[in-house]
Image (tube, coloured by chain):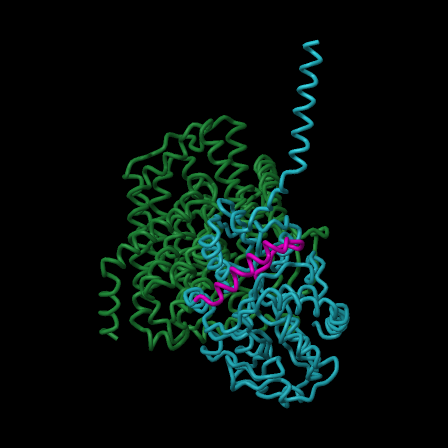
Chain colours: A cyan, B green
Amino acid sequence: MTKNLVMIVVALILAVTGVMAGCAPKAQPEAPADFYKGKTIELVSTASPGVATDLILRIIASYLSGDTSASTIVTDRRGAGGMEGMSYLYKAKPDGLTLGMTASVKFVGNKVMGEPAAEYEIEKFSYIMSIGRRLTYFYVSPEGPYQSVADLKAGKNLKIGATSPSGYVSLADLTVIKLLGLDAKVITGFDGTSELSLAVKRGEVIGYGVEINQASIEAGMIKPIFVLATERDPLMPDVPAITELVNLSGEDLELVKLWETALVNSSLFIAPPGMSEDRMGFLRDLANKWAQDEGFRQEIDAVSGEEVQVYITGEEVTKVMQDTAAALAKFQAIFAELIEKYRA
Amino acid sequence: MFEAYGTAIATLFQPVNLLVMLVAVIIGLIVGIIPGISGATMLAILLPFVFHMPAEVALILLVALHAVVYTSGGITSILLNMPGEGSSAATMLDGFPMTQKGEGSRAIGAAITSSMAGGVVPVVLALAMVPAIMPVIIAFGQPEMAILVLLGISFLAALTGGSVTKGMISGLLGLLLSFVGFHSVTGVHRFSFGTAFLYDGIALVPLILGLFGLSELFHLVMRRETAITQRAVVKLSGVVAGMKDVWRHRWLWFRSTIIGYIIGIIPGIGAGVATWVSYGQAKQTSKHPEKFGTGVVEGVIAPEAADNAKEAGALLTTMALGIPGSAIMALMLAAFLMVGVTPGPSMMTEHLPLALTLLLGVALANIIGGIICLFSASYMVRVASVHLDFLFPGILIVALIGVYVATLSPMDFIVALTFGLFGLVMRRYGYSRPALLLGFILGGMFERYSLLSIKIYGPLFFIRPIPLALLIIMILLLNYPYLKRALPGLWRRRVKP
C-alpha cells in the first residue's frame, strides 16, 4: 500500500515536472558578447611574421581581447604560402573562437592558379572586414632598356621574374604578358620581392609585378611603369593605369577588374564557413567600430607604412567573393593556358 | 660626421635607452637558448607594441634583442648537442665533443667571446663599407650565389668523419631530403605524397632537434650516461681559457668574422652558408684537420664568429639599401617603416645619427650580452652533468615544445622522433650526421640558384669572373692540406742547384 502510494507520488512529481518543463519559456541563446567572456580566441595568421597582414592581426588581437574580455592567441600557420592556415580555418568549428587573417591576393590567387593545397572555397568563408587596398604595379629597372609599354612590346625573348610558380607575382606577370601580348617567359624561383628587385637591378630579369614596394623604389632598384587597374592609384597618382596605355576589352578588361577587386592586396579578417548570424553580426559590428576608431586606424597605418583609407565591410567582401567564385572556372582556364605557354 | 657620432653616443647612453637595451639583451639571450623559438618569432611578437615608442627606443629594443640571439644560440649546441638557433648547428660539431671531454666551460668561453667580438668588430667596418655595399650586392647574381653555396657544400668532405664513403652517402641523403616539397623554380611537387604538410618540405627545426638533440639523448639513455663522460670543469678558469683561445686563434677568428660579414651583406644567401663555410675553412687550413669533430676549440670559434658577424652585415644592407636579406631582417625593415624611418641610401644621410645609434647599439648589446653569458657560463655548464633521470625528461620536453612552437604541426613530432631514431642508427654505424645536415641545408639552395642561373644565363653560367675565382678558391681549399705538404718540397727542389 505504502509502496503504491510512493510510486504514485513519484509519478505525479515527474508528470508535473515534465509539464512545467514543457511550459517553461525556451532558454534564450547566449548573447555573443556574453559568449566570449573568459574564452580564448585563436587568431590564425597565414602571413610571415612582420608582414603587414600578420601585424594587423596582432593589433586586432588586442582590440578583440579588450572588447570581448576573451583571451586571444595568434598562431602562425603560414605553411604552403598561407594555404595551410586558410585550409585549417576553413575546417575549423564555426563557433567564433577560431578566426584568421590572410592577404586577399594570395587567398584568391591560389584558387585562380588551381593550387591543390588550397582546400577551401572562397565564397563559403564568413568575412568580417577587409583592411587596405593595395594595387599591383609592374616594375622595371630605372636604367634598363625597357622604360615604357612600347619598349616592352618591342622586346624579344623577355625574362620576367617571379617567386613561386603559383604565387601572386607569377599571376601578375602572366596577366601583364597576356594584356600586352609580350614575347616573354616568366622565370620563377626567386626568394621574395627584395631578391627580385635586385635581379631587376642586375638585369637578370627585366621586371616583375607586385604591390607598392617603397623600399626598393627609394633604393633606386626599380620603378613602376603602370598599375594593373582601370584608374590611377591615389597612393601613386603619377603612375598611369594600364587602361590608359593600351585598349582593353572583353576578357582582358575583366582580368584588370579582377586585379582591382578580389586580387587587390588587402588584409581579410575571416571566420570559418557556417558562422551563426548573431556572432557574425557581433564581430562585424566590432570591426566596423574599430574602423571608425582613430587610435586603431593610427596603429594600422603604422604597420602598413601608409595611411590606410579603405576599410571594407564584411557584407561587401562577401559580395566580391561570391562574384569572383562565379567566374572562377573561367579565370582558372585562362591562367592554366598562360602557365603552359609562358612559364620558362 | 663627428657630430653625428656624438649625438649617437649621447642617445645610446640615455638611461631609458640603456635600460631598454638591458631588458632586450636578456630577452634575446633567453630566446637564443631555447630551441625552436627564433629571434624572428620574438621580434614579430614585439613589433605591434613598439610603434607607440619613440623611434630610437623602439629600434634599440629590437636591434639589441636581435644582436644577442646568436650570442647565446651556441650554448645549447655545446652543452646538449641541440642548437638554440638553426644557424648554430655547425657549433655542435666540436662544441659538444668538448663538453663530453669536460671542456664545456672552455667551449662556451670561446663561443661567447668569438661571437661577441664577431658582432662588435663588423660594426667598425660597417660605415667604411657603405659605399661598397651596392656594388658587392649587384656583383653577386644567381651564378655567384650558386658557386658560393657550392663552396659551402664542398666542405662536405671535411665533415665526413671516419669514412669518406659513409660521409658522402650521408651528404647525398641530406640532399635527397632537401628535395621534398614544392619546387619554386619548376612548380613541381616532389615526394610530398599530396599532403599539405610536406608542401614546404621537411622543416629544419624538427630535423635538427631530432637528428642531433634527441638521438644524443636516446644514446645517453641507452648507455645510462650523462652528457659529460669526464668530470666537468665548472670553474671560471675554464671560461677564461676559452676566451684566451680566441686570442690565440685570432687570425682564424678574424677570417671567420670577415667571411660571415661578407656573406651577411649579400641578401638571401642565408645563415647556413656563413657558418659552414667558416667551419670548413677552419678545418682545411688547420695544422691538425684530422682532430676536427673530436672537440677542438677552433671548430667552435670559427662558426660562432661568422654566425654573429653575418647579422651585422645583414643589418647594414637592410639599413643602407632597404634590402632585407633574411626573415629577421624583413621584420627589422617593417619595424623601421613602422616608426617612420624608411631604410635606404637616404637613411645614411638623413638619419645618420639614428643609423649610428643602431650600429653602436649592436656593438654595445653584444658586449653586455657577452659579459652576462661569460659570467653565467660556469653555471650553465652544470646542465650537462645533471643526472640522466632528470635531464632526459626535461630536455625531451624542451625539444618537443621547440618543435611544436616552430611549426605548430603535431606531425613534426613524428619528424623529430623519426630523425631522433635515424640519428641514433647513423651514429651507431658511423654515418655522418653533420654531412647529412649540410646536404639538407645547402642542397636545396644550390639547386635553386643553379637552376635560376641556367634559365637566365644558360648552362655555362659559371664562366664569369667571380664564379671562376670562387671555384679556384674551392679547389685550393680542398687541396690545401696536400699543397701545404707538397709546396715546400717543390720549393726546396727548385732552389737546390
Dividing the picture into quarters, in which one does residue B458 lie? bottom right
Is A256 left or right of A306, judged from the image as shown?
Answer: right
Q: Which residue is rendered at x = 74% and y = 70% of the image? A: A327
The answer to whether residue B484 is seen in the rendering is no
Q: Nearer the viewer, residue B38 or A299?
A: A299
Q: Which residue is rendered at x = 61% and y = 49% of the image? A: A95
Query: Image height check: is A150 above or below B203?
Result: below
Q: Which residue is rendered at x = 28% and y = 39% of the image? A: B236
Q: Which residues are magenta?
A: A269-293
Q: How many marks?
A: 0
Dividing the picture into quarters, in which one does residue B383 lie? top left
Q: Nearer the viewer, residue B102 or B354?
A: B354
Query: Image height check: is A118 above or below A193?
Result: above
Q: Nearer the viewer, residue B28 or B119?
A: B28
The answer to whether residue B135 is seen in the rendering is yes
Is B340 left or right of A279, judged from the image as shown?
Answer: left
Q: Main secondary structure of the magenta part?
A: helix
Is A47 left or right of B243, judged from the image as shown?
Answer: right
Placement of the N terminus of chain A among the 4 image quadrants:
top right
Query: Image height check: is A134 above or below B361?
Result: below
Placement of the C terminus of chain A among the 4 image quadrants:
bottom right
Q: Position of residue B330 (x, y in %)?
A: 47, 64
Q: Position of residue A243 (x, y in %)?
A: 64, 86
Dividing the picture into quarters, in which one does residue B452 lie? bottom right
Q: Position of residue A321 (x, y in %)?
A: 67, 67
Q: Is residue A290 magenta?
A: yes
Q: Position of residue B272 (x, y in %)?
A: 50, 55
Q: Nearer the viewer, residue A7 or A132?
A: A7
Q: Is residue B327 magenta?
A: no
